[in-house]
Amino acid sequence: MNLSHLRYFVKLAQIKHYTKTAELLCITQPSLSHAISQLEKELGVPLFEKGPHGTDLTGFGKQFFASVNSSLNILDNGIETIKSGSRGNGIIRIGCLRTLGIREVPELAAAFKESRPDKDIRFTFHIGLSNRLIQSLAEGTFDVVFASRPQTMSQFEATAIAKQELVLIVPNDHPLAQNYVVDLRDTLDYPYVFFDKTSGLRPIVAHMFAEINETPKIAYEVSEDQVVAGLVAQNFGIAVVPFMDMLLQLDVKILPISHPSYERKFYMISNKNQYAPPVVQDFKKFVLDKVRNT
């Protein structure tokens, strides 16, 4: 069934006059008449009849008009949505670590929107752990994730966008609390509160111990860095964590690590196997430009 013929049908049903409808459609009246005849032939019923005030719909015509008009509206809305997306409008679905969701990611999103005042740009935000965020990215739930670097990079693109110092925290009354800095080799006699296997920090901290060919005594394992810090403050052990402002509010001593020194990097991660709409491509470029100019 010809889409143009359906549009002609709807317009004639609204105008109720062949000549005026043909003029509005910028076609000849014979062309309009032929299109309607083709529709009626295909359907096997008349769609129009002569009425007291012009051309009226038949009973079949009224039923057909309701269906066609609704379908064309849905189609036109869908076309407009796609065209709007092609012009750089749309939704960007972001997943990020809690620590990045406090300042860095909101600032990037706000700056991007502000730099494009003529665009209709919206965001969705989801907070989670690195492994779960990356899994959701692989499944197509997010367009961009801000997290630790994926352990397997085959389907991902990852660019470092920020860094965070790793420190050792101990209870204030701990023997190591008298130090100003600490070597991880001097911590091996003490139990650790460690990140569990769902945390993106687990392989990072484990790598630090691998560098000194040692294994920490793990007493407890949790996923959230804030929970790790809370347990340390209550004497459940010591821990290597990213420096966070909240550490200053807890009863812990914060010790820079002299050896092995290590910085935790945060990455903007996207899925190479997933099509990125223009608005997402634009946002990624915006973030990369920000990073290069910082």
Image (spheres, rainbow, N blue to C red):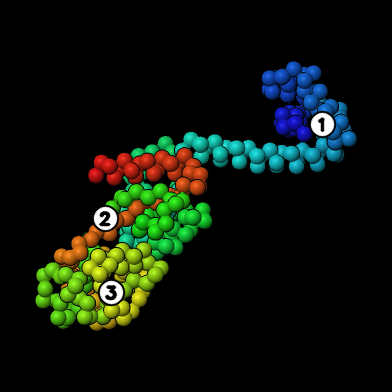
- The crowd level at tag 3 (other Cα within 10 Å; few <14, some 14-19, many 20+) is few
- Identify the residue at horizontal 77%, vertical 20% (top origin): 31
Q: Secondary structure at mark 3?
A: loop
Location of residue 63 (image quadrant): top right
Residue kind at label 2, given as amino acid type: Lys
Q: Nearer the viewer, residue 284 or 134?
A: 134
Q: Secondary structure at mark 2?
A: strand
Report which residue position mark 3 lands on: 215
Q: Looking at the image, is mark 2 or mark 3 earlier in the sequence?
A: 2
Q: CA distance from mark 1 to mark 2?
A: 65 Å
Question: In which quadrant will I find the C terminus?
Answer: top left
Residue kind at label 1, given as amino acid type: Leu
Q: At which x and y percent is residue 37?
A: 84, 27
Report which residue position mark 2 lands on: 163
Q: Nearer the viewer, mark 2 or mark 3?
A: 3
Q: Looking at the image, is mark 1 or mark 2 earlier in the sequence?
A: 1
Q: Nearer the viewer, mark 3 or mark 1?
A: 3
- Identify the residue at horizontal 37%, vertical 72% (top origin): 196
Residue 121 in view (yes/no): no
Left or right for 254, reference 40: left
Q: Secondary structure at mark 1?
A: helix
Task: Pick out the residue farthest to the front.
Answer: 213
Residue 82 in view (yes/no): yes
Q: Nearer the viewer, residue 52 or 34?
A: 34
- Identify the residue at horizontal 85%, vertical 39% (top origin): 59
Q: Looking at the image, is mark 3 or mark 1 earlier in the sequence?
A: 1
- Identify the residue at horizontal 39%, vertical 61% (top origin): 130
Residue kind at label 3, given as amino acid type: Thr
Report which residue position mark 1 lands on: 39
Q: CA distance from mark 2 to mark 3?
A: 25 Å
Vertical order, 1 against 292 (above or below): above
Vertical order, 241 against 274 (above or below): below
